[in-house]
Image (tube, grey):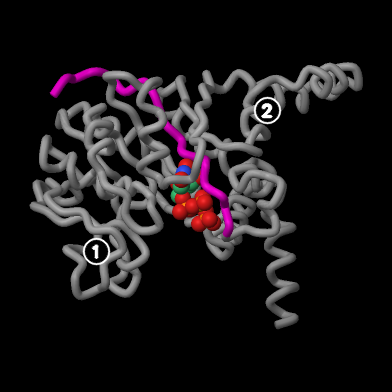
Amino acid sequence: MSQLRVRKAVIPAAGLGTRFLPATKAIPKEMIPIVDVPMIQHIVEEAVRSGIHDVILVTARHKEAIENHFDFNFELEESLDQKQKKDLAEISRSIGRLCNLISIRQKAPMGLGHAVLCAAPVVGQEPFAVLLGDDLIDSEVPCTRQLMEIYESQGASVVGVMEVPQDQVSKYGIVGGRTLRPGLIEVDQLVEKPSPELAPSRYAIPGRYVLSHRIFECLQNTKPGKGGEIQLTDGLQLLARVERLLAYEFEGTRYDTGDRLGLIDATLAYALKRPELAPGVQELLRKHLRGS
Ligand code: UTP
């Protein structure tokens, strides 16, 4: 396998976001904020902090707000400058400068595997990271950076995993294989949402991957599964047959922001980390708990 550097990240964001209706009727799920920063900005910032500048957004109709967010907003920024609100103007401009955003459309919601495949013409023959917007991972070393280091040292594609309780395995893609050292597994099995008795381990894949471009031929050969969708897990299963695939237990706290309670959890955790908000949020929490 070639040892090219990972320079590109793919962010699939073409899903319908039905779990957040009615909020997602007219705005993309990815623009829902954690406090005051849209979820997608946290994800793009993780890629950028990992050393990636080219971000490929797989998007869909009615999702233009995401592209606008990563552009400059001339009227807003000029108006803030004129009002001497330079710090706010800089917040807005800095998002425009964050990365080189390349967007490509998935024309029908044919699954996560299909969304990744849509990025193939832009990725070309290079390894690349995949970050799902539904998983926010708070860590000192960005999760994607941790996976890039494994990719570079081991010369193999790698999926980020976390250990989950037995009764939760049926919510995730689960890996099985041989432990090479604590936290690093050579994968020979991937099962999408297994029942607890059939799960090969308790190592679940939230949404972080660093993959070789050979995943694209695997996805092309992946038959649609449930609901006619092409699953990334099925493509990874094929990849594990043609080359080494590793699973790495990343360090960090993961929030499931694709779920309403997970979003509330992340909002509280991120608000409590902000010195200007923490005392007020603690007071609000005490007030609500007293009332319960
Ligand atoms: P989800 O299964 O969470 O679907 O997709 P969703 O549409 O975003 O949300 P719900 O379940 O209806 O509320 C996981 C990830 O895969 C992307 C989504 O945007 C999300 O980041 N995805 C899924 C696509 O890009 N295309 C698809 O066809 C399906």
Badge 1: how crowded within 10 Å, few (<14), some, or many (20+)?
many
Total numbered circles: 2
Give the labeled residue for mark 2: 68
**Which residue is depicted at the point 64% across and 21% down?**
96
Numbered disc 2: secondary structure: helix
Q: Secondary structure at mark 1?
A: loop
Kindly indicate the quadrant of the structure image that contains residue 51: top left
Residue 3 colored magenta?
yes
Instruction: Please identify the residue farthest to the right as the structure is shown.
Output: 83
Reply above or below: 272 against 157.
Answer: below
Task: Identify whether 175 is placed above or below 52.
Answer: below
Mark 1 lies on residue: 202
Q: Quadrant of the C terminus?
A: bottom right
Residue 149 placement, left or right of 288: left
Percent from the top left, x then y, of residue 168? Answer: 34, 69
Q: Name the quadrant containing residue 27.
A: top right
Kindly identify which numbered label has been placed on residue 221.
none
In magenta, the rendered stretch is 1-18
